[in-house]
Amino acid sequence: MAIRVTVWNEYLHEVQFPEVAEVYPKGIHGCIADFLKEAGMDVKTATLREPEHGLTQEVVDNTDVLIWWGHMAHQEVSDEIVDRVYNRVLEGMGLIVLHSGHASKIFRKLCGTDSWKLKWREDGEKEILWVVDPSHPIVDGLDEKIIIPHEEMYGERFDIPQPDEQVFRSGCCWHRGKGKIFYFRPGHEVFPIYHQPEIQKVIINAVKWAAPIRFPNTTFGNPAPIMPVKGEMEHSVQGLHDQKSIS
């Protein structure tokens, strides 16, 4: 069964700035959706200005992995929708947060830190991403480094929790409840980052990694014991001895 992906994007830069629309005529969400469809995934898109930001309960319930790109309108995202996505992540939905999505309400809620705090420099210089865990499935089929010809730079200190796994110097993984989260830093809107094959490969691999698995049924609360508790066991043994004595 194909992985069900929803690609969420503010879709404001592409509407307001011709230089961004030239790079992403279908929107950043459209570009990402296209290469995920080519990879055999079942893909939908959603944008900020749609009713419920395109993330209705039905959409979220039928999403295996949600990809999130936001930048200039984090504050416009409804807290109700954030809670809806948050709960689905805890239930097992994967979440991939891209570039300036580090400042989104949903990423901050899942991190529990001021993840909007970092340094940046918008100079369009060449960047090299180094693989730090060559055994990780997100880097399957990649070289030891990815060269991005032009990109906005981020720098430390970046106020995120210690990653459970670090794949690139700009790619970190966490687990929350049953859900898996991948933050991938490249993706400044004026550069054709998401047209680059290596970047597409990372996102495709990340979707496969973050997709839910079938978890064993788990009970909470005060379940009945699987085996007799100590007092019951002693009582049972004593009863057996009594039966032998009588016989």
Image (cartoon, rainbow, N blue to C red):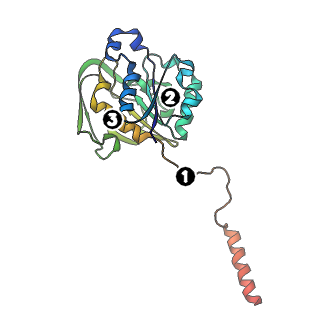
Mark 3 in CB contact with mark 2 (< 8 angstroms):
no
**What SS does tag 2 mark?**
helix
Based on the displayed image, in which of its 4 quarters is residue 24 positioned?
A: top left
Q: CA distance from mark 1 to mark 2?
A: 27 Å
Residue located at (34% from left, 24% from top): 187
Instruction: Name the kind of residue labelled 1 in the image.
Output: Pro
Residue 69 at x, y = what percent? 42, 24
Instruction: Name the kind of residue labelled 3 in the image.
Output: Val
Q: CA distance from mark 3 to mark 2?
A: 22 Å
Q: CA distance from mark 3 to mark 1?
A: 29 Å
Based on the displayed image, in which of its 4 quarters is residue 197 positioned?
A: top left
Classify mark 1: residues with Cα within 10 Å, few (<14), some (14-19) or many (20+).
few
Total marks shown come to 3
**What SS does tag 1 mark?**
loop
180 versus 187 height, above or below: below
Q: Residue furthest right?
A: 246
Residue 85 at x, y = what percent? 54, 31
Pointer 2 residue:
106
Q: Nearer the viewer, residue 114 or 98?
A: 98
Pointer 1 residue:
216
* Left-right relation of 56 to 198: right
Which mark's residue is nearer the viewer, 1 or 2?
1
The disc placed on residue 73 is: none
Pointer 3 residue:
202
